[in-house]
Amino acid sequence: MKKIFLLFGLGITIACGGQPSGSLVVVNKADHAVSLIDLKLGKIVATIPVEYGPHEVAISPSGNIAAVTNYGDGAKVSNSLTIINIPEKKKITTIDLGEYRRPHGAEFINEKEVLITCESKSRLLLADLSTGSITEVANTAQMGSHMVAYSVTDKTAYVANVFSGTVSVIDVPARKLTTVINFKAGIEGLAVSPDGKELWVANRNDSNVTVVNTTTRDVLAVLPAHQVAFRVKFLTNGSHVLVSNGMSGNVSIYDAKARKWLRDIDVASNDGQPVPVGLTADIHNRYAYVCLAGYNEVAELDTGNWSVSRRIATGNEPDGIYFSPVSIKE
């Protein structure tokens, strides 16, 4: 297998404070490319071609490395993972996933290993970026294994199975499926709290979000969202949760501790449908970001007053998005 040499521990620039800093990696599905956006500059500083039909992206803990899942579309199936060096603004390599077609959700578990869902085989995979090797973590035993959330506190992965309406709970070190939590068909976006104690799961069919205790598996709350509740994101400090509502043109905000809906942020700027999809947040809990697939832009959300503070142009049909603390030079 071809070796992949990554520069872990690159020299990077990380800024702090109230001004937006760091960068965003945005997946543009229709362009088969990703945009690297520097947040201080508020614009795209690089566009990197990937493979056909990219959907999601994850970024390593240092912020240096991005992994993009190339899923395909209705006309063509893809089966690869593109690895990008963020500070150097270049593609490192593309890993061929072979029989594991339709890779989708992704999350790093450390600087060189990333979890990937595989819809075609109902598997959770682990890619080792230092060697290019792919191993099976577990069979989800469900249909439509779409998104993955990972808890660093207990090294547990949660996979949302859209068609089965379930979440597969997987012990990553043990490479074992431990249980399956039943919800309803249509679940897709999910996020685990920073302390690992709660799992929030959005249902695009029922327009709500369900909160589950990760130890007992008990349902703690079912909260209202809006049409096509799509993605879920905790702020880094765990204080609030955001849910993007794809066909309602807004993002719902929740008090995580109280498990209570607070408000909706309207992200529309004209008569067209914005289609809010992918969500991310900075490490300072100051700003969150949502891709607007209908506008080809990212909306920056100020968490101080929960309003749209800025809009940044992307490529065509932005979907997956991830924050990096790395500031990128032009």
Image (cartoon, rainbow, N blue to C red):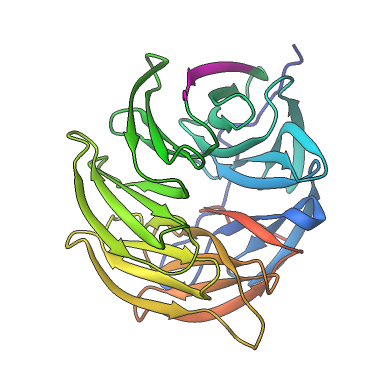
Residue 195, placed above or below residue 208: above
- Is residue 51 inside the magenta stretch? no
Residue 243, placed above or below residue 64: below
Residue 127, placed above or below residue 237: above
Q: Position of residue 7 (x, y in %)?
A: 64, 31
Q: Main SS of the magenta segment?
A: strand
The quadrant holding residue 122 is top right
- Is residue 135 inside the magenta stretch? yes
Question: Magenta segment, which residues?
Answer: 134-141
User: What residue is drawn where x is 35% and y is 54%?
Assistant: 236
Who is closer to the viewer here, 258 or 281?
258
Tell which residue pokes out farthest to the top in this image. Answer: 1
Who is closer to the viewer here, 148 or 204?
204
Q: Is residue 163 visible?
A: yes
The quadrant holding residue 234 is bottom left
Who is closer to the viewer here, 37 or 207?
207
**Left or right position of 308 against 167:** right
